[in-house]
């Protein structure tokens, strides 16, 4: 059985004061894996503060090299040093605003696993791609690039987040049946290579998840929880989303 997971992607939001508020007040029961992805700067503080509770911390990005002359970048090993256990790779904002190609994303996925971080591979199509009937082929291409770099074994210790770009920060959410259909498709792609890995991998949904829509999304068979943006910065709203995933 796949344990549900709810992850908070704070993006470039948050502050020392918000970290303190979360450390003092965030309370979730043990039936859901909760991961916070704050801006890198706050990784250490949150990972130390949440050590005793079952809440993990991850980073929103890594660079593929271990070290070197890459001003401003942070390697996966450094993220581990700061207490991170997970890393987002290939978030659509990284792909679209920072020009990360499928191959760059795949290199980052491999770098995470080399360092012992669990990658959360973000994939998803744009509005135009869905309108053009290309949603599945885009997602397939994004998964294939990682399969080429990491092999199917790479997915044995990874999480996938399906985040349709048209639903991110727009208030528009994929309908549960639409999301379910894509989640089943993604699992099906992996199923052709390894049934156990495909069955066990968590596939999260991201894109305007809120307390008001979480329960119906998470009720779908192949939706194992959510990757939450805007709504994850409000403690009570986020706790409700965690409860909606809790089994
Ligand atoms: P929103 O929940 O704000 O739509 O963001 C989703 C997202 O990008 C999570 O990674």
Image (cartoon, rainbow, N blue to C red):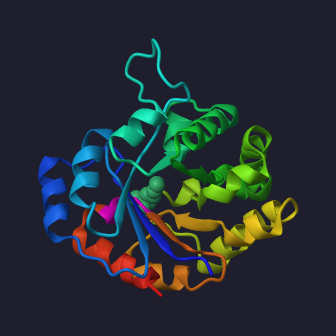
What's the magenta region?
228-232
Quadrant of the rendered structure where residue 174 is?
Answer: bottom right
Rendering coords of residue 71 (x, y %): 39, 16
Rendering coords of residue 91 (x, y %): 53, 46
Relative to residue 170, is residue 75 depicted above or below?
above
The prevailing secondary structure element of the residues shown in magenta is: helix
Frontmost residue, 37 versus 86: 86
At horizontal 54% and vertical 79% (from top left) the residue drawn is: 217
Left or right, residue 84 beside residue 104: left
**Does the magenta-highlighted stretch encompass residue 231?**
yes
Quadrant of the rendered structure where residue 30 is?
Answer: bottom left
Left or right, residue 28 beside residue 180: left
Relative to residue 148, is residue 58 depicted above or below?
below
At horizontal 52% and vertical 39% (from top left) the residue drawn is: 115
Res. 169 in view: no
Relative to residue 42, is residue 206 depicted above or below?
below
Res. 34 in view: yes
At horizontal 79% and vertical 61% (from top left) the residue drawn is: 190
Which image quarter holds the N terminus?
bottom right
Frontmost residue, 239 versus 83: 83
Rendering coords of residue 77 (x, y %): 45, 35
**Does the magenta-highlighted stretch encompass residue 3?**
no
Relative to residue 70, is residue 181 depicted above or below?
below
Question: Regarding ligand 1, which quadrant of the image does it lie in?
Answer: bottom left
Rendering coords of residue 215 (x, y %): 47, 84
């Amino acid at each position: 059985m796949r344990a549900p997971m709810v992850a908070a992607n704070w993006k470039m939001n948050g502050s020392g004061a918000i970290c303190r508020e979360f450390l003092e007040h965030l309370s979730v029961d043990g039936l859901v894996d909760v991961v916070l992805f704050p801006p890198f700067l706050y990784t250490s503080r949150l990972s130390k503060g949440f050590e005793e509770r079952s809440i993990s911390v991850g980073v929103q990005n890594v660079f593929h090299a271990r070290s070197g002359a890459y001003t401003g970048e942070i390697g996966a090993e450094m993220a581990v040093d700061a207490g991170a256990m997970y890393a987002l790779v290939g978030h659509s904002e990284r792909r679209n605003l920072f020009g990360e190609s499928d191959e760059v994303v795949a290199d980052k996925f491999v770098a995470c696993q080399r360092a012992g971080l669990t990658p959360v591979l973000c994939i998803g199509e744009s509005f135009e791609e869905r309108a053009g009937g290309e949603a599945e082929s885009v997602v397939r291409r994004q998964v294939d690039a990682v399969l080429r770099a990491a092999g199917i074994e790479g997915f044995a210790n990874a999480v996938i987040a399906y985040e349709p770009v048209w639903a991110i920060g727009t208030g528009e959410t994929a309908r549960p049946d639409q999301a379910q259909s894509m989640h089943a498709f993604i699992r099906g792609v992996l199923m052709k290579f390894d049934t156990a890995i495909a069955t066990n991998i968590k596939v999260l949904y991201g894109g305007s998840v809120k307390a008001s829509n979480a329960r119906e999304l998470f009720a779908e068979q192949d939706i194992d929880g959510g990757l939450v943006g805007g709504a994850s910065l409000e403690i009570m709203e986020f706790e409700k989303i965690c409860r909606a995933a809790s089994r």
